[in-house]
Image: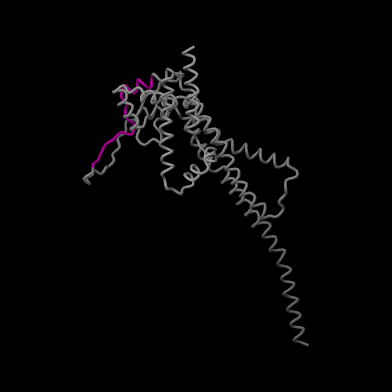
């Protein structure tokens, strides 16, 4: 009897202790763990949907607002850089090159002529190593890639009209970007469009009364992550569309001259052929190459530039129109 009383008492004590601990455990979970998980999921949502564009936006905005100062700094510099090459016999050659070199007078004259044709400010010209494109411009200076600048100088010396027309169009394209305040517009777009999409999605979500409501805590936190990914792709899609519009606007700003338009048109045809050969011959499993090769329409939606086919077609229309006007 005594043993039975001890066992029953122990069970009652254990049960009472267990029932007393449950509210305490629930309180800790409700007050600390769940809010922490919720805030972490919210931070992840914003980090995915807005984070990648925040840095780009601030950088572009700063560059756009300090465009004059950056141009003045580049124009005032003549920085020497050294790099080493290996000769055919295995010997090492140290070559001194210029990061911001003064341009040849013929190049300066070419840029000035193009600026006058499109009513842009006349900038100074610098040769620059390692830029990602053939040319780039600020309000005060046009930077030409070293390799491309040498091609243009050779073309000017040999009076290669086709190459000169191509270079003139590329310079006009970059000056048009500068006239349109490209970096400033990009900065504002990167900072505002993700926020605008967030607000519009929130309003639309409230308006859709038939949309299923997620009740569970885990479901709500998972939805934050998945919606962040969805918003990222939506934001990227819209911003790339703006980039393509800016590129097309810069193309449209090239002056109405048949030779200049023909030069840039032929340039894009050559690039289209080169790209086609690379895509056909390349054995690469990277996502970008796979998408470009097998899903060209989807790839085009997320491209920063219009397709070569689209740009060539636009230039063909303008050239044909100008030829008809001249024959009329």
Q: Is residue 95 left or right of residue 286?
A: left
Of 111 and 69, the residue lying toward us: 111
Which quarter of the figure is the N terminus placed in? bottom right
Instruction: Out of 71 and 320, give the one closest to the viewer.
Output: 320
Q: What stretch is highlighted in magenta?
A: 93-112
> How many numbered tags mark residues here?
0
Q: Is residue 68 visible?
A: no
Q: Position of residue 300 (x, y in %)?
A: 52, 37
Is the image coloured rainbow, by chain, by secondary structure, or in one colour? one colour
The single residue placed furthest to the bottom in the displayed view is 1
Find residue 108 and report its horizontal and vertical position in percent. Answer: 35, 22
Magenta-colored stretch includes residue 97: yes
Q: Which residue lies furthest to the right in this view?
A: 1
Vertical order, 40 against 197 (above or below):
below
Please state if 5 lies on the left or on the right of 185 as rendered. Answer: right
123 and 154: which one is in front? 154
User: In the figure, is residue 44 to the left or right of 74?
Assistant: right
Q: Is residue 279 shown above or below 31?
A: above
Along the horizontal axis of the image, is 225 left or right of 265? Answer: right
Residue 188 in magenta? no
Q: Position of residue 288 (x, y in %)?
A: 48, 44
- Residue 25 visible here: yes
Position above or below: 67 against 301: above
Residue at position x 23%, y 41% from top?
A: 93
Place of residue 91 in the rendered image (x, y in percent of width and height, measured from the top left):
21, 45
Residue found at the far top of this picture: 328
The quadrant holding residue 134 is top left
């Amino acid at each position: 009897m005594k043993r039975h009383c001890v066992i029953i008492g122990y069970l009652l004590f254990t049960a009472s202790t267990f029932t007393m601990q449950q509210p305490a455990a629930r309180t800790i979970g409700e007050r600390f763990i769940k809010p922490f998980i919720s805030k972490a999921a919210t931070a992840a949502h914003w980090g995915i949907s807005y984070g990648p564009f925040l840095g780009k936006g601030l950088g572009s905005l700063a560059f756009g607002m300090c465009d004059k100062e950056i141009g003045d700094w580049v124009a005032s510099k003549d920085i020497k850089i050294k790099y080493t090459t290996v000769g055919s016999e295995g010997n090492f050659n140290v070559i001194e090159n210029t990061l911001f070199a003064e341009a040849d007078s013929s190049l300066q004259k070419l840029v000035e002529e193009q600026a006058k044709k499109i009513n842009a400010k006349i900038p100074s010209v610098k040769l620059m190593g390692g830029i990602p494109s053939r040319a780039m411009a600020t309000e005060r200076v046009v930077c030409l890639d070293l390799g491309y600048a040498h091609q243009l100088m050779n073309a000017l010396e040999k009076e290669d009209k086709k190459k000169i027309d191509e270079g003139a169009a590329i310079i006009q394209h970059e000056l048009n970007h500068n006239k349109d305040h490209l970096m400033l517009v990009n900065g504002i777009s990167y900072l505002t469009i993700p926020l605008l999409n967030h607000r519009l999605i929130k309003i639309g979500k409230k308006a859709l009364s038939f949309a299923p409501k997620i009740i569970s805590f885990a479901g709500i936190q998972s939805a934050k992550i998945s919606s962040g990914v969805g918003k990222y792709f939506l934001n990227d899609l819209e911003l790339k569309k703006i980039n393509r519009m800016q590129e097309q606007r810069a193309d449209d700003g090239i002056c109405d001259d048949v030779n200049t338009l023909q030069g840039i048109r032929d340039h894009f045809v050559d690039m289209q052929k080169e790209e086609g050969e690379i895509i056909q011959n390349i054995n690469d499993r990277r996502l970008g190459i796979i998408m470009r090769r097998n899903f060209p329409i989807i790839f085009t939606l997320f491209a920063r530039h219009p397709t070569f086919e689209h740009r060539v077609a636009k230039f063909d229309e303008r050239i044909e129109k100008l030829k008809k006007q001249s024959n009329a």
